[in-house]
Image (tube, coloured by chain):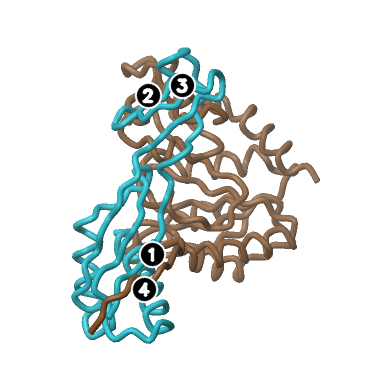
Chain colours: A brown, B cyan
Amino acid sequence: MTTKKIPVIERIMSANDKVALENRRILDEHNTHAINIMASPGAGKTSLIVSTIKALKGRRRVGAIEGDLASTVDSEKVKAAGVPAAQINTGRMCHLDANQVHDALGELPLDDIDLLFIENVGNMVCPVGFALGEHTRVAVSSVPEGDDKPHKYPTIFANVDVLVINKTDLLPHLPFDVAEFRRLAKSLNPDVRIFEVSCVTGEGLDEWSEWLVQLTES
Amino acid sequence: MHELAVTENILEIVGRHARAAEAERVLRIHLVIGELSSIVDDCVQFYFDYLSEDSIAEGANLVFERVPITLRCGACGHEWQPGDAADWTCPACGLARAGVTAGREFYVDSIEVE
């Protein structure tokens, strides 16, 4: 039997990317701007979303998709802040994919949502590889995690639009060099926009939410 | 484990192309993976051996061609490979304007069938 080589040249993520494009079409149809929030567990993704919902009250209508391995803890927190939320439980999966987000979009009143936060599963590696149809990608990195995060996870830092440094209220207590962190992040991603916030004191949230308001000006 | 999702995709793509070519068996699968993607070769092969049982690709070998990250400085045009270093400041001019020119590849290049 003869062996032959067949050219394929097909992107491994093409099936996911196709659904991501469809998600984008649905979002655009409803004039909803989606933000994919990625970070390690405990960086403060949910706190940032809840604080932002409060800061944007009366200015932008917010909604959320909450991704987690299990439980509805996060979506309950977001709903308690008064906005529509859908929960995705990924079970064994370490990331959200476009299909899961597609299903969640069907559960949300998109006509009433200007800004949709998609909170990814807590993980600095896997979520980056899966397009969801989002318009903006945000990484959250918190002060207690250390200022060497860009060294350890260059891929996520190189592939986001925005970087939020969270828990800045802890800076006086920890050896975190903000300037060096910013320098490294900018070296990996010259165009990345960086915000410094504390969801505890509220510091920096004004600048962040003002930027979100401008982002969703239609 | 996102290697599982990735492997399912590879198997689907390979099966579709092999059937279209009326192949009986897939022997080798050539993948081109940039260093910016975070997948572990052995892990994909492990899942592949498990998922491909009783399929046209059962027993196929995965061949990984890894593409190193290549950067181009947007300020001075210098090109270099940073390797494992996560500081992408240009070694020639000292500015942080690096653009990725290679290292994001993530595709099935070809299959060998009989």
Chain designation of label 4: B
Chain designation of label 3: A
Distance from disc 1 to disc 3, alpha carbons, whole Å, reads 32 Å
State the residue in front, B79 or A161: B79
Residue type indicated by callout 1: Thr
- Picture disc at residue A182: 3
Number of other residues with Cα within 10 Å of mark 4, as a class: few under 14, some 14 to 19, many 20 or more? many
Instruction: State yes or no: discs 4 and 2 in contact (Cβ < 8 Å).
Output: no
Instruction: Please check whether the numbered discs 1 and 4 fall on a single chain.
Output: no
Distance from disc 1 to disc 2, alpha carbons, whole Å, reads 34 Å
Residue type indicated by callout 2: Asp
State the residue in front, A30 or A66: A30
Q: Position of residue B33 (x, y in %)?
A: 35, 51
- Picture disc at residue B87: 2
Q: Is residue A51 above or below residue A10?
A: above
Instruction: Please check whether the numbered discs 1 and 2 fall on a single chain.
Output: no
- Picture disc at residue A105: none
Which of discs 1 and 2 lies nearer the camera? The answer is 2
The residue that label 1 is drawn on is A90
The residue that label 4 is drawn on is B14
Name the secondary structure under disc 1. Answer: loop
Judged left or right of residue A149, residue A160 is right
Distance from disc 3 to disc 4, alpha carbons, whole Å, reads 42 Å
Distance from disc 1 to disc 4, alpha carbons, whole Å, reads 26 Å
